[in-house]
Amino acid sequence: MSPIITQPGMPAHVHPDAAARQRCDRLARATAEQAEAALGYLSMIDPLMFEIAMDAADLITGTAPRDEATGDEAVPVCRRCGGQVGIFLDHGLDWQHFHGDGTTAGAQEIYDPGHLPEVTWRLPGENPQQS
Ligand SMILES: [Zn+2]
């Protein structure tokens, strides 16, 4: 007769939330040099994921990409309709379509075009329908 005793052991698969937490913890411990090296490596092995990660970082930090030649700062627009989009803190943290100059406080009018903003960044004079 064999005893029915379970043996403690590691789970076969790490829970997805635990794996995400481990990656966050590892990133938090990384130096700027390690993060730069990791992104450099990612740009070589998976250029698309690198671009997605950098675009996400721009959105999260509110950093607009720049034209290296002219220094012009890109502006956020909706990929779907080409309209201007922005985050208005008095309306929450979601992107909103708006009319206005985008710089003067209170001079913007938020509107609903019937779809959620699909945020992308465009340099001044660049057609939003390109790319
Ligand atoms: Zn739109």
Image (spheres, grey):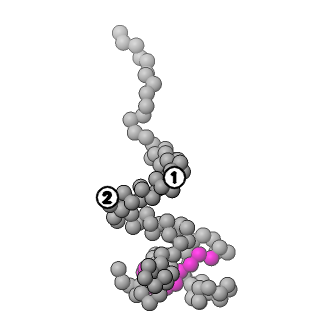
Q: How far apart are marks 2 and 1 (CA)?
A: 21 Å
Query: As drawn, which residue projects farthest toward the left?
Result: 45
- Left or right: where 75 falls relative to 87: left
Label 2 SS = helix
Q: Nearer the viewer, residue 6 or 19?
A: 19
The kind of residue tagged 2 is Ile
Residue 122 in picture, x, y percent from top left: 45, 81
Residue 93 in picture, x, y percent from top left: 60, 70
Q: What's drawn in magenta, residue-wise?
A: 77-88
- Give the residue drawn at x 49%, y 47%: 26
- Give the residue drawn at x 59%, y 85%: 102
Q: Which of 123 and 112 is in front in this view?
A: 123
Q: Which mark is residue 31?
A: 1
The kind of residue tagged 1 is Thr
Disc 2 crowd, CA 10 A, few/some/many (<14, 14-19, 20+): few
- Give the residue drawn at x 40%, y 13%: 3
- Left or right: where 25 falls relative to 92: left
Residue indicated by mark 2: 45
Q: Is residue 84 magenta?
A: yes
Query: As drawn, which residue projects farthest toward the top?
Result: 1
Q: Is residue 122 magenta?
A: no
